[in-house]
Image: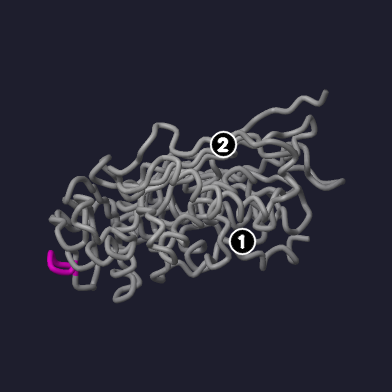
Amino acid sequence: MAEFSLFTSESVGEGHPDKVADAVSDAVLDHCLSADPMSRVACETLVTTNLCVVAGEVTTGAELNSDVIDRIARAVIADIGYDDKALMFSAADVEVRNYVHAQSAHIAMGVDTGGAGDQGMMFGYACDETPELMPLPIAIAHRLTRRQAEVRRAHPGLGFRPDAKSQVTMAYDSAGRPHHIDTLVFSTQHDENLSLEDVKAIVEEHLFAPVLAEVAELVTGDIVRHINPTGLFVIGGPHGDTGLTGRKIIVDTYGGYARHGGGAFSGKDPTKVDRSAAYAARYLAKNVVKAGLASRCEIQLAYAIGVAQPVSVRVDTWGTAAKGLTDLDIAAKLNATVDLTPAGIIKMLDLRRPIYRDTARNGHFGHAAFPWENTDLAEQLA
């Protein structure tokens, strides 16, 4: 009998409290970049019962007073779907507090000369398990939460509410290749008039069935299913659990399938290498795999605050590098091909644009609309 190893990843819906906070922070960033592409933004948001607190360090030529912050936050909350006063967190009733102030002049000194906005290490990853070159567990988990939001908007009468979580357990064979889906977990907030059996039936029909049809080759037997395993899920969103910017860093990246440097993304302008260098590392890893140089690739970049050049660039392909290539060869090729200074990354990926609000939905990677998902470097690397 074949033996399989199991690996699990989770995703959360756009109405999860932490993602609401991410969305508000990134909407503030987009507002600033729309008027002033050179804006320096480090925005943090906290959401709880009928309260949204926005704080951080911002230096921008854009108008950014309490009225503007209030308008941005309410627009995001309404867009996500919190428009019902009964949820105890709604765009109409929420209190928005603004505690934004100017960025530290000492940090600005290093950034003004082209250096990194902070120290730290960042990881990027790609593999050939999916067309978007993402690990399968997180890719399927994201499809489920994305589908929940689509169904909720298209069929409000079904009774889905914005808060949701998914979890996918994949069975891998002895060669490390995905073999089948072992377990699916899905929890969704819902209207109070729905029973648990109602919720299970709706999730099976409108979420599991269409998503599993997309990956039919991975459905080789009975899949263990857990739908709202604690029972009813009426109280949710920021009323059910406080949300904070940057608290879903594994959901935002590779579902735990690759290492993480620890820095969150949302609310940070691209001079912060926590964000821009993580995007650059993903871009390079994806192009390495697309070019056929390896079937798996993880790239680590590390920076010192105020210093432009990375202090290290490391490539790990877990022995999957193409014949005749080593990980050191690939690292040397990348160093010779791209400029990995913060300014070079910003130019390469055109990051001084208002493109960040959508990253608060279904992770930052694997979506073709983002510039770090381009594979335009693959031919040159090959």
Mark 1 vs mark 2: which is more N-terminal? 2
Q: Residue at x 78, y 60 (%)?
A: 382
Instruction: From the viewer's side, name the closer residue of 184 and 169.
Output: 184
The image position of residue 362, as x and y in percent, is 48, 54
Q: For mark 2, does the 10 Å Cα neighbourhood hold few (<14), some (14 to 19), or many (20 or more) residues?
A: some
Q: Are the residues tagged 1 and 2 within 8 Å (C-beta)? A: no
Q: Residue at x 70, y 54 (%)?
A: 288
Instruction: From the viewer's side, name the closer residue of 272 and 371.
Output: 371
Q: Quadrant of residue 172?
A: top right
Q: Residue at x 32, y 53 (%)?
A: 20
Q: Quadrant of residue 340?
A: bottom right
| Secondary structure mostly seen in the magenta stretch | helix
Q: Which residue is mark 2?
A: 225
Q: For mark 1, does the 10 Å Cα neighbourhood hold few (<14), some (14 to 19), or many (20 or more) residues?
A: some
- The quadrant of the rendering that contains the N terminus is top right
Q: Nearer the viewer, mark 1 or mark 2?
A: 2
Residue at the far right: name it.
Answer: 323
Can residue 156 be seen in this snapshot? yes
Q: Secondary structure at mark 2?
A: strand
Q: Quadrant of residue 76?
A: bottom left
Q: Which residue is mark 1?
A: 338
Can residue 303 be seen in this snapshot? no
Q: Which residues are magenta?
A: 64-68
The image position of residue 307, as x and y in percent, is 43, 51
Instruction: From the viewer's side, name the closer residue of 67 and 184.
Output: 184
**Amino acid beneath label 1:** Val
Q: Residue at x 38, y 63 (%)?
A: 357
**Amino acid beneath label 2:** Arg
